[in-house]
Image: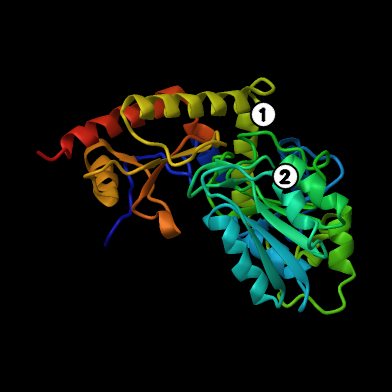
Amino acid sequence: MYIYKPDYLVMTAGPTMVSGNVLQARAKAFGNPDLDPDFFTFYQSVCDKLKIFFGTEKAQMIIMNGEGMLALDAACASLTEKGDEVLVISNGVFGEGFKDLILQYGGNVTIYESDWKSGLSASKLEEFLKSKSNFKFATIVHCDTPSGVLNDIGPICNLLKSKGILTVVDTVAAVGGTELKVDEWNIDIALGGSQKVFSAPSGLSLLSISDDAWNAIENRTTPIPSFYCNLSYWKNCVEEMLFPYTMPASDIMGLNAALGNLLSERPNRVIERHEEMRDYTIERLKDMGIELYLNDSFSPTVTAFLVPEGYDAQEIINHMKNKYKILIANSYGPLKNKVLRIGHMGENARFDRVMFTLDNLEKTLCDLKRG
């Protein structure tokens, strides 16, 4: 019988390493989340903690049973009706990926494509919107992890709102590790996941939903073509004490412990250490003579760099995992095998882990050097 027992440090752009107290929380006894009133109280308390990281007092938080991709799918399923005009704002692999979700539900997609090596520009988007702005909603990625770009979404979301366009923001790889202000930036649906900065196991989607988004969902002219991705079932689930399906109590208990770990740090310290680890990673890579992929807008949660000339991406990954017990990541789409990525988010945004990773990347390049 094969036993899966990974023995390496996970330094990818999610999932991240999980603290012992989070694992222990998931192993505790739990009751019946369908029938126990105390669980609904607990669920709401976890949602209230999430509001701190999402920067909202007005929006409703919900926790769904499914990896962060479920959040993206549910937002598109619940907002999109056949023939709706939807703007996909893209400067990366995942930004462009929203197109397939919207087309699946019958929307008409317009892609606003921007340079993948730089952050999005609100002023350039404003120029684009002068020619067409009749969009029901727009999608945007906060941190596009295949390239490590961090977009300044505040001005963009406020701009879209001023045009009457709802906003759907994928902040799965950013929330918690950088500033997010759902209320101030007029974000209608913000999408997160448990396995990134929050450093809980994958399996939970985290969403904030504004009143305007609820209004759009509840006033559709056609039914939402999904049960599992139907956000309307979540609007009053705590008040009515009725979840759409049995909630994963142990996963939410683990998330609660993970949020407690972050909240135990002094205010702003979590964001500060993410920024410190980004800066340290960039400095070390430059010292090694390694070229960064981006020109600007470097995320505090993940850094992408070009595979050095003469090396193979997968060979570097395999060597680090097998010899030094560290897992870093390849990229996706057109960046695959051209770009490697080091995640420094959540529990991994700590100096000892990042230094250890970079030290052994340097050793790996020496080990594999030809000639």
Instruction: Indicate the amino acid at tag 2.
Output: Ala
Residue drawn at 86 percent across, 64 percent down: 216
Within 10 Å of disc 2 (Cα), the crowding (few <14, some 14-19, many 20+) is: some
C-alpha separation, residue under disc 2 versus residue under disc 1: 32 Å
Residue 345 x, y percent position in the rendering? 52, 36
Q: Quadrant of the C terminus?
A: top left
**What SS does tag 1 mark?**
helix
Task: Locate residue 11: give its quadrant.
Answer: top left
- Residue at image position (84%, 58%) is 213
The color scheme shown is: rainbow
Q: Nearer the viewer, residue 160 or 187?
A: 160
Q: Residues within 10 Å of mark 1 (few under 14, many from 20)?
A: some
Query: Is residue 116 at all visible to an observer of this figure?
Result: yes
Would residue 70 appear left or right of 42 to someone viewing this image?
left
> Which residue type carries mark 1?
Leu
Q: Is residue 84 above or below residue 362?
A: below
Q: Residue at the spot x=23%, y=43% of the render?
A: 319
Q: Position of residue 162 (x, y in %)?
A: 87, 50
Q: Quadrant of residue 286?
A: top left
Q: Nearer the viewer, mark 2 or mark 1?
A: 2
**Do we see residue 67 in this rendering?**
no
Viewer-side residue, 192 vs 150 = 150
Residue on which the image places disc 1: 263
Q: Which residue is mark 2?
A: 122
- Give the structural element (helix, strand or loop) at label 2: helix
